[in-house]
Image: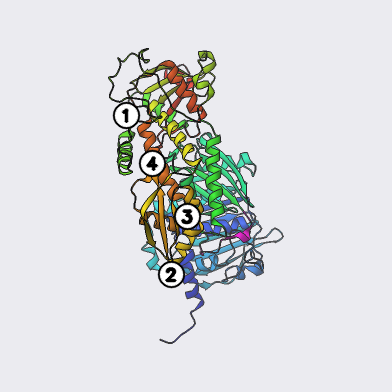
């Protein structure tokens, strides 16, 4: 077949296949155009999930009549200077409008501030209609009808009206978070309306916009983030560990104000919350990265949802470090949703609360513990209890003859832990004074304005884990010499990357060196790992270094074993504690970062405010 030049319509339809995936993609492109034009109000109307109608109206600067024809021409834009590396707008490719017009019926009606009247231009399936006068206020209205009528095959891949409307709503919310000074309105054919009034560009205004999108309880369960490293600024909010979601849909990330879905950022968030969340739960985050446009490539894909950083290791390290530092500095906090769940459970006729419970999680950690080579580990300084001893009678506090509760050498323990304090003084602390122990596992404490219920096993498990981690990472990890070095064959570039990180790996107990071209020799492995698959471990590390320029895989494996040891070395359910032992545990919880959740991500305590209790009894 001879080579021939494709028609302009065909070129635009090919581009539309990349840029216009579904109605939500159209809304994204049109709303971004409105924001680039300086709009303070953006109104979106859809019908048929956006397949029948999409109308976006803004009060921006508008398009002059002589430029309307250029606006729908391919690769024509007002947003890009001569430097492709200096992109400071949301759009810049000049592809969206001609791509939409090639697969739908598109009309643009616009008026500038200095214009006496408005003008309108249209495209139907790639056929350009002449410019004509129109009536309109200042700004632009873009109307898209019969999306994909010119490419009916694409219609077969569309989901139902509800699913498409939901995707459109998600796009608008993601953009709205980055522009709190703009009012957004989204109306659908099902008469549902999403209204996001402008909240202002101040820090309080940005948090108010986040609350509009993510729910009013998010600010009460969020920790602020503000960090800078080598010219990269990270700001935003992350949820406390006990406030989670079943999926990652409520993780919002922005690079220079642009909403992105970047795997490096998502992986950094997972890494930062790795040991404080259950594996099937996800943190709620809103993170804004600001950096020199020349150090990030936003032109990776026509949809502009992916980005590429010049220094990915710097970005990942900043995110992980800033989140972990914020979690450590936030003190002990319980999610407000826990109290809400308790309130709901107390109401007459409420269904019993279904929680996955510790059994499944503990079974999986017990299996990992046995497989790790520590099956013989039975006693340690962190395991003061003899599980074979007979249980004392159940009478609230531990008896005088009971062995004293020993938390072991916990570096995080507060000095007050061993001091008998007046109950009145303890009431002013975060977790208050212990009043009773119920069901041999739950400590009931009182503060000045709340009731606190603590899971003693989960709480002590976190304390032991943090102590083990501190010991593990404060010095080089002990290693064991292999009788015969393990030779791992790798692509040359992977071997070189591992060699470059050999000093860091040695701190974690993994000793390796180059062994000719395309291979490394492993001479030492971390003692904590016991017998491990060295080949797989090294290949996993090579893959992670290639993706993120980090060696977090090895650190996470060691942390998992520390978590298993903590689970086995902590005070068990069924152990009766004396009052001073319970207060010692509460004081150590207050002094230990992350003690609001156990190693498996479950909450260690729930706080119920006195006002909520009085409401239960009809006093308020």
The image quarter in which residue 81 lies: bottom right
Quarter of the image for residue 96 reads: bottom right
What is the C-alpha distance between the residues marked 4 and 3? Answer: 26 Å
Q: Which mark is residue 150?
A: 2
- Circles 3 and 2, Cβ within 8 Å, touching? The answer is no
Q: Is residue 176 left or right of residue 436?
A: right
Say which mark, if any, is on residue 263: 3
Foreground tag (1 vs 3): 3
Which secondary structure, mark 2?
loop
Q: Nearer the viewer, mark 2 or mark 1?
A: 1
Mark 4–mark 3 CB contact (< 8 Å): no
Figure quadrant of the N terminus: bottom left
Q: Which residue is mark 4?
A: 561
Number of other residues with Cα within 10 Å of mark 2, as a class: few under 14, some 14 to 19, many 20 or more: some
- Between the C-alphas of marks 1 and 3, the distance is 38 Å
Establish if 181 lies above or below 462.
below
Q: Is disc 3 surrounded by few (<14), some (14 to 19) or many (20+) residues within 10 Å?
A: few
Residue in the picture at 51% in, 53% down: 503
Q: Secondary structure at mark 1?
A: loop
User: Residue 619 location in percent, x, y?
Assistant: 46, 16
* 90 part of magenta stretch: no
């Amino acid at each position: 077949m001879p080579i021939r030049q494709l028609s302009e319509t065909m070129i635009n339809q090919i581009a539309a296949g990349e840029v216009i995936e579904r109605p939500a993609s159209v809304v994204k492109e049109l709303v971004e155009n409105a924001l680039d034009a300086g709009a303070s109000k953006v109104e979106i109307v859809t019908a048929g999930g956006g397949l029948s109608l999409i109308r976006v109206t803004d009060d921006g600067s508008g398009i002059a009549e002589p430029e309307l024809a250029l606006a729908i021409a391919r690769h024509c834009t007002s947003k890009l200077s001569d430097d492709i590396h200096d992109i400071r707008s949301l759009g810049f490719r000049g592809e969206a409008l001609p791509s939409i017009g090639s697969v739908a019926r598109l009309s643009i009606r616009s008026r500038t501030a200095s214009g006496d009247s408005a003008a309108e231009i249209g495209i139907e399936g790639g056929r350009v209609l002449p410019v004509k006068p129109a009536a309109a206020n200042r700004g632009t209205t873009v109307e898209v009808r019969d999306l994909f009528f010119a490419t009916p095959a694409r219609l077969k891949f569309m989901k139902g009206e509800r699913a498409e409307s939901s995707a459109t709503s998600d796009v608008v919310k993601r953009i709205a978070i980055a522009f709190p000074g703009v009012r957004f309105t989204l109306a659908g054919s099902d008469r549902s309306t999403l209204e996001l009034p402008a909240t202002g560009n101040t820090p309080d205004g940005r948090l108010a916009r986040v609350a509009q999108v993510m729910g009013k309880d998010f600010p009460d369960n969020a920790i602020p983030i503000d960090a800078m490293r080598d010219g990269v600024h990270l700001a935003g909010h992350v949820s406390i560990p006990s406030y989670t979601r079943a999926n990652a849909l409520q993780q919002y990330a922005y690079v220079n104000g642009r909403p992105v879905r970047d795997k490096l950022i998502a992986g950094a968030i997972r890494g930062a919350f790795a040991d404080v969340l259950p594996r099937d739960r996800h943190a709620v985050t809103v993170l804004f990265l600001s950096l020199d446009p020349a150090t990030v490539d936003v032109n990776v894909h026509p949809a502009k949802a992916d980005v590429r950083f010049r220094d990915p290791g710097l970005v990942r390290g900043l995110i992980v470090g800033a989140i972990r530092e914020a979690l450590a500095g936030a003190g002990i906090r319980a999610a407000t949703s826990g109290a809400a769940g308790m309130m709901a459970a107390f109401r007459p006729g409420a269904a019993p609360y279904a929680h996955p419970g510790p059994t499944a999680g503990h079974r999986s950690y017990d299996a990992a513990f046995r497989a790790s080579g520590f099956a013989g580990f039975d006693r340690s300084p962190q395991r003061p209890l003899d599980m074979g001893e007979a249980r004392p009678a159940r009478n609230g506090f531990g008896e005088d003859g009971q062995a004293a509760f020993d938390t072991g050498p916990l570096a995080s323990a507060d000095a007050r832990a061993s001091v008998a304090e007046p109950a009145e003084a303890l009431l002013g602390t975060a977790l208050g004074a212990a009043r009773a122990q119920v069901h041999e596992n739950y400590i009931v404490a009182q503060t000045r304005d709340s009731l606190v219920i603590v899971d003693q096993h989960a709480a002590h498990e976190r304390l032991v884990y943090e102590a083990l981690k501190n010991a593990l990472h404060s010095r080089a990890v002990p290693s064991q010499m292999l009788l015969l070095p393990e030779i791992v064959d790798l692509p040359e570039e992977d071997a070189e990357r591992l060699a470059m990180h050999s000093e860091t790996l040695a701190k974690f107990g993994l000793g390796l060196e180059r062994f000719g071209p395309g291979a490394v020799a492993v001479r030492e492995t971390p003692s904590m790992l016991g017998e491990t698959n060295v080949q797989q471990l090294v290949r996993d590390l090579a893959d992670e270094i290639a993706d993120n320029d980090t060696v977090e895989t090895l650190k996470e494996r060691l942390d998992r074993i520390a978590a298993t040891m903590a689970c086995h070395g902590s005070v068990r359910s069924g152990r009766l504690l004396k009052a001073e032992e319970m207060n010692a545990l509460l004081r150590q919880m207050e002094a230990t970062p992350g003690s609001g959740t156990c190693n498996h991500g479950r909450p260690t305590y729930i706080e119920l405010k006195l006002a909520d209790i009085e409401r239960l009894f009809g006093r308020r």
